[in-house]
Image (cartoon, rainbow, N blue to C red):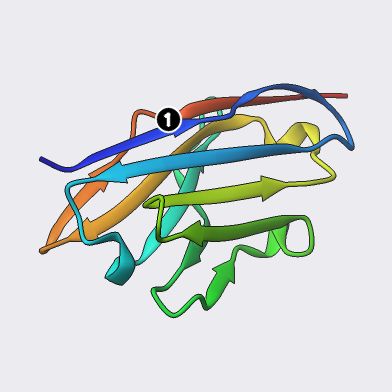
Amino acid sequence: QVYLVESGGGLVQAGGSLRLSCRTSGINFKIARMAWFRQAPGKQREFVALINNDGSTNYTDSVKGRFTISRDNARATVYLQMNDLKPEDTADYYCHTTWRSTMYWGRGTRVTGSA
């Protein structure tokens, strides 16, 4: 059974920082591509960042220079460090991977940025 469990969300003032974590089980984490998505109220879920098994990364333009995705293979955990948060970053953040042709999502963690 594959599990993705997010944590670390919360309320933060504009300009503040948060670090999200996604602990995984049931996959060979070392070879998995991991990603973060987010869904703001009333909007569709959107891609935020991904990290490949070689450590290479990709980000959506709106978070470049502010967010950093990283991974700890020993802990089977992926992180999203979010700096200089803006009110428009308010969303539910979801961890995602595709494993053996099946897409998996966590339940999400809420980030609320206040002006």
Q: Is residue 70 left or right of residue 50?
A: right
Q: Residues within 10 Å of mark 1 (few under 14, many from 20)?
A: many
Q: Nearer the viewer, residue 71 or 85?
A: 71
Residue in view at x 65 percent, y 40 percent: 19
Residue in view at x 58 percent, y 29 percent: 8
Q: Is residue 78 above or below residue 101?
A: above
**Residue at disc 1, secondary structure:** loop
Residue in view at x 87 percent, y 31 percent: 14
Q: Is residue 64 above or below residue 113?
A: below
Q: Is residue 37 above or below residue 33?
A: above
Q: Which residue is mark 1?
A: 108
Image quadrant in which the N terminus is located: top left
Q: Is residue 35 left or right of residue 2?
A: right
Q: How many marks?
A: 1
Q: Place residue 98 in its image quadrant.
A: bottom left
Percent across and percent down for residue 34 are 39, 59
Percent across and percent down for residue 69 are 59, 58
Image quadrant in which the C terminus is located: top right
Q: Is residue 114 left or right of residue 27?
A: right
Q: Is residue 58 above or below residue 45?
A: below
Q: Nearer the viewer, residue 29 or 74?
A: 74
Q: Is residue 82 left or right of residue 115?
A: left
The single residue placed furthest to the front in the displayed view is 74
Badge 1 amino acid: Gly
Q: Nearer the viewer, residue 99 or 61?
A: 99
Q: Place residue 35 in its image quadrant.
A: bottom left
Percent across and percent down for residue 41 are 54, 25
Percent across and percent down for residue 36 are 47, 50
